[in-house]
């Protein structure tokens, strides 16, 4: 059997354009010439086309099909395995998308019959979260009704904003306790990932105006940080001499701002499998030691701070030092101290 391109297209249910595309790719070329010079498809070409169409039903890329049929660089079994991996990844992506659509639907349902404006505020908030947090935004309780945060976070923010607007001092008991609850909530929901907290902090600091319905502003963020610093300082105070406490108090909030970013870098090295003695990890360990010395100011104060941290579980809240990262940091610092001797 010998067929012209139009005849084969009709029999196979394809277009002539598709067969020409296969020809250009080297996937299916007419292998026979008529006496008058026409290029024709022979029996072997028809068999090859059947193989191509069978594999295309599995959405396998044309180039991989060509490799299988021509050079045998891929076996059919490996081709199917690779396609299964792609299908699994697509199913995962679609499930994530489905989950996000459900969260949007639930958020809008909180408004009863949401207006177009409420829908737009929610979608705008999603766009901002994705830009700063990527796919990890899906794992956080960011999405509430009308562009607000989800209830668990919005309640904490509303509490802090009310105290801020009432001019409650950051060192007051109410502000300290509320800030402690906020940091504990965020640490829990980020699963103690410091790098995620850094991105959240940048999000709220830089995009407050784009998220007006959350109530988050740079000024409120500064107030929360100051209140949380005061909460921790109130615990350290029980262990420090008055002069050491005054030294710590003057520096504490400033140094705290550098802490999450350092831990975020340390996390990346831990995830990459870098040893505590790795040069970059040692640089972070030295930076950590420098921060500690800046805070303490003396060996006696350093010892008192360590005693407080050993005795007071509350000083572990909001540190983003989960057990694996803490052990990694301890080994890195020990190596840095040995090198410094």
Image (tube, rainbow, N blue to C red):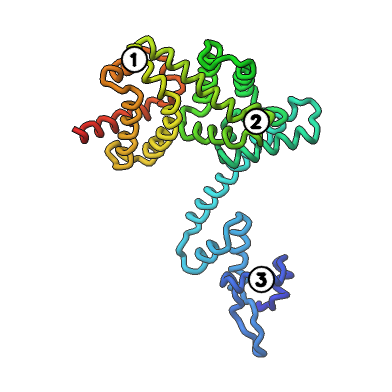
Label number found at residue 143 = 2
Asked whether the beta carbons under mark 1 and mark 2 sit within 8 Å of each other, the answer is: no
Q: Is residue 333 left or right of residue 171?
A: left
Mark 3 or 2: in front is 2
| Chain-order first, disc 3 or disc 1 | 3
In this view, the residue in front, 271 or 248, is 248
| Mark 2 element type | loop
Q: Residue at x 71, y 66 (%)?
A: 14
| Mark 1 element type | helix
Residue that carries the numbered disc 1 in the rendered image:
243
| Chain-order first, disc 3 or disc 2 | 3
Q: Is residue 245 left or right of residue 209?
A: left
Which percent across, then down, holds residue 95? 62, 38
**Residue 261 appears in which quarter of the rendering?**
top left
Residue that carries the numbered disc 3 in the rendered image:
19
Which percent across, then down, holds residue 256? 43, 27
In this view, the residue in front, 331 or 25, is 331
Q: Residue at x 51, y 52 (%)?
A: 82
């Amino acid at each position: 059997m010998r067929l012209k391109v139009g005849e084969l297209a009709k029999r196979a249910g394809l277009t002539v354009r598709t067969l020409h595309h296969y020809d250009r790719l080297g996937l299916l070329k007419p292998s026979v010439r008529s006496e008058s010079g026409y290029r024709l498809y022979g029996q072997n070409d028809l068999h090859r086309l059947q193989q191509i169409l069978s594999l295309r039903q599995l959405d396998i890329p044309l180039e991989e099909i060509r490799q299988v049929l021509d050079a045998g660089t891929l076996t059919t079994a490996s081709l199917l395995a690779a396609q299964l991996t792609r299908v699994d990844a697509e199913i995962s992506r679609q499930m994530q998308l489905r989950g996000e659509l459900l969260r949007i639907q639930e958020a809008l349902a909180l408004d009863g019959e949401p207006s177009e404006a409420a829908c737009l505020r929610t979608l705008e908030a999603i766009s901002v979260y994705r830009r700063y947090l990527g796919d990890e935004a899906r794992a956080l309780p960011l999405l509430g009704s009308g562009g607000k945060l989800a209830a668990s976070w919005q309640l904490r923010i509303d509490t802090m904003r009310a105290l801020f607007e009432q001019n409650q001092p950051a060192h007051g008991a109410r502000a300290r306790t509320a800030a402690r609850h906020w940091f504990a909530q965020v640490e829990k929901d980020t699963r103690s990932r410091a790098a995620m907290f850094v991105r959240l902090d940048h999000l709220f600091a830089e995009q407050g105006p784009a998220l007006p319905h959350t109530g988050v502003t740079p000024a409120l963020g500064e107030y929360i940080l100051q209140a949380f610093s005061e909460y921790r300082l109130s615990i350290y105070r029980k262990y420090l001499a008055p002069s050491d406490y005054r030294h710590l108090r003057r520096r504490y909030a400033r140094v705290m701002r550098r802490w999450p970013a350092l831990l975020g870098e340390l996390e990346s090295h831990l995830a990459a499998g870098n040893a505590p003695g790795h040069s970059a990890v040692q640089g972070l360990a030295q930076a950590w030691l420098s921060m500690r010395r800046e805070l303490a100011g003396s060996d006696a104060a350093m010892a008192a701070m360590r005693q407080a941290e050993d005795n007071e579980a509350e000083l572990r809240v909001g540190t983003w030092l989960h057990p694996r990262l803490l052990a990694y940091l301890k080994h890195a610092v020990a190596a840095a101290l040995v090198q410094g001797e």
